[in-house]
Image: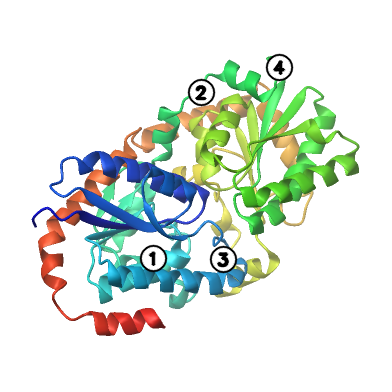
């Protein structure tokens, strides 16, 4: 194999995916010192992965959505990204491809990599597909598409590993990389609170609405109204909001200004932390300072849990997505339980969650600001049974996630897959695949 560099292609989407890709790139670079030709990492991602040393082919930070209807507005940009990625892959055929979540882009890329280019492909933090894989039509069953395009899945927790193993995919359990970021960047609580401007006696509630614009519009109003109710009940409460993206900053500030006018509160009742340039660092600081949180479902739920911050999870899909899920995926209220990531991993309700399937009698869809505020108030009480239950659940969650080191374990597995197949890949490169693959890429 000589002294040619090991070529790695990677693709990640939203803020959390880019953070995990950045940590993975750093671990891969540490391993590069033991490789004869070093390595070259190219791919699709955001600013953090570029700062870590990846050569970016295209920026994915603006193309990210969840839900069925919400994705429709992203179709054209996604197709452009896929085409750009295919062109790059044809020109610089990698020894291994690493895909992080982001199924709208990564599922078609994985099939192209395996079926057209015959490149070994590793899914790291694969999509949480088991909730949908047995529902509705085969057309919407992405689990089997993921397995068809995958050499190996690097799973973050046992439920994920079991799902993909049952479909016949090679699986390695590596744990969740968020533990690495938290272990490396542990911040002293008194110093962080002082830096953010909070007094020692004040109760700090983190408000964590979303990292995507579509989600902000759906969950931000409910979170703000719950904060107003909590403020009226507990005048000692202060709020902190970490900004996940520069693109969201105007939406956040406008929402706070309208909220303050409507409820007769000062706009600085909610302290906005950061400008979106360092979402991981700002979130870690706010989580370290917080006594509890009201957060959208997602990676933030896990981050708060690993910081031992009790939380209430909130999520609301658009009405069209809800209808499509009901009729195409045949989803029931029971299927929509435990959607918050902490609850999802543990398969039980560790933290209170409020969604369309919520049990609250106050609001038709369960996302009731009054109910959210009531659950938050219970978790603010240091001696409450509700708070003790959540913290005990967090302790069991840590045991299930294998502890820090996920990024290093993933990097070692990726290099192992790449080096094991590099000789075969070099032989395959001499086969005239480009005609069919180029035709596919041009579509």
Badge 2 density bin: few <14, some 14–19, many ≥20, Cα 10 Å: some
- State left or right for residue 379 relative to residue 288: right
Q: Quadrant of residue 336?
A: bottom right
Q: Could you tell me residue 396's position as x and y percent?
A: 43, 32
Q: Which residue is mark 4?
A: 199
Viewer-closest of 291 and 41: 41
Which of the two discs, 2 and 1, labels the residue nearer the N terminus? 1
Above or below, comparing residue 109 to residue 267 in the picture: below
* Secondary structure of the residue carrying numbered label 4: loop
Report the Cα–Cα distance between label 2 and label 1: 38 Å
Residue 313: % across, % down: 62, 43
Q: Are marks 1 and 3 in contact (CB under 8 Å)?
A: no
Distance (Cα) linking label 3 and label 4: 46 Å
User: Which residue is under mark 3?
Assistant: 331
Q: Which residue is labeled 1 in the image? A: 143
Expressed as whole percent of the image width and height from the top left, the position of residue 231 reads 81, 31
- Location of residue 16 in the rendering, given as x and y in whole percent from the top left corner: 49, 47
Depth check, front residue: 154 or 29: 29
Q: CA distance from mark 1 to mark 3?
A: 17 Å
């Amino acid at each position: 194999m000589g002294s040619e560099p090991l070529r790695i292609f990677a693709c990640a989407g939203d803020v959390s995916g880019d953070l995990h890709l950045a940590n993975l790139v750093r671990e891969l670079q540490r391993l590069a010192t033991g490789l004869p030709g070093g390595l070259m990492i190219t791919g699709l991602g955001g600013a953090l992965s570029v700062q870590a040393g990846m050569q970016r082919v295209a920026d994915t930070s603006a193309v990210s959505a969840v839900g069925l209807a919400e994705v429709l507005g992203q179709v054209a940009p996604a197709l452009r990204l896929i085409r750009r990625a295919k062109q790059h892959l044809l020109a610089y055929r990698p020894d291994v491809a690493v895909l992080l979540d982001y199924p709208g882009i990564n599922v078609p890329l994985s099939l192209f990599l395996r079926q057209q280019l015959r490149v070994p492909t590793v899914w790291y933090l694969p999509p949480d597909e088991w909730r949908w894989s047995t529902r509705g039509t085969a057309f919407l069953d992405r689990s089997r598409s993921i397995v068809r395009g995958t050499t190996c899945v690097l799973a973050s927790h046992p439920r994920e590993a079991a799902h993909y193993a049952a479909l016949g995919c090679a699986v390695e359990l590596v744990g969740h990389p968020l533990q690495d970021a938290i272990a490396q960047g542990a911040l002293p609580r008194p110093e962080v609170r002082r830096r953010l401007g909070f007094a020692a006696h004040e109760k700090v509630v983190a408000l964590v609405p979303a990292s995507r614009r579509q989600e902000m519009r759906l969950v931000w109003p409910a979170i703000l109204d719950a904060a107003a109710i909590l403020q009226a009940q507990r005048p000692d409460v202060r709020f902190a909001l970490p900004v996940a993206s520069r693109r969201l900053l105007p939406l956040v500030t406008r929402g706070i200004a309208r909220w303050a006018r409507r409820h007769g509160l000062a706009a600085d009742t909610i302290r906005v932390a950061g400008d979106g340039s360092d979402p991981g660092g700002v979130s870690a600081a706010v989580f370290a300072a917080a006594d509890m949180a009201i957060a959208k479902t997602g990676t933030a739920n896990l981050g708060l849990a690993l910081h031992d911050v009790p939380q209430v999870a909130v999520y609301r899909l658009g009405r069209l997505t809800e209808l499509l899920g009901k009729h195409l995926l045949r989803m029931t209220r029971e299927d929509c339980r435990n959607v918050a990531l902490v609850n999802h991993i543990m398969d039980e309700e560790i933290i209170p969650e409020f969604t369309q399937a919520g049990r609250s009698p106050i609001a038709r869809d369960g996302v009731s600001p009054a109910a959210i505020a009531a659950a938050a108030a219970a978790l603010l009480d240091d001696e409450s049974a509700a708070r003790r239950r959540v913290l005990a659940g967090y302790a069991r969650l840590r045991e299930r996630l294998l502890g820090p080191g996920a990024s290093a374990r993933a990097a070692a597995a990726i290099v192992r897959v790449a080096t094991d197949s590099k000789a075969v890949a070099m032989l395959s490169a001499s086969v005239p695949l480009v005609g069919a693959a180029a035709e596919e890429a041009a579509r």
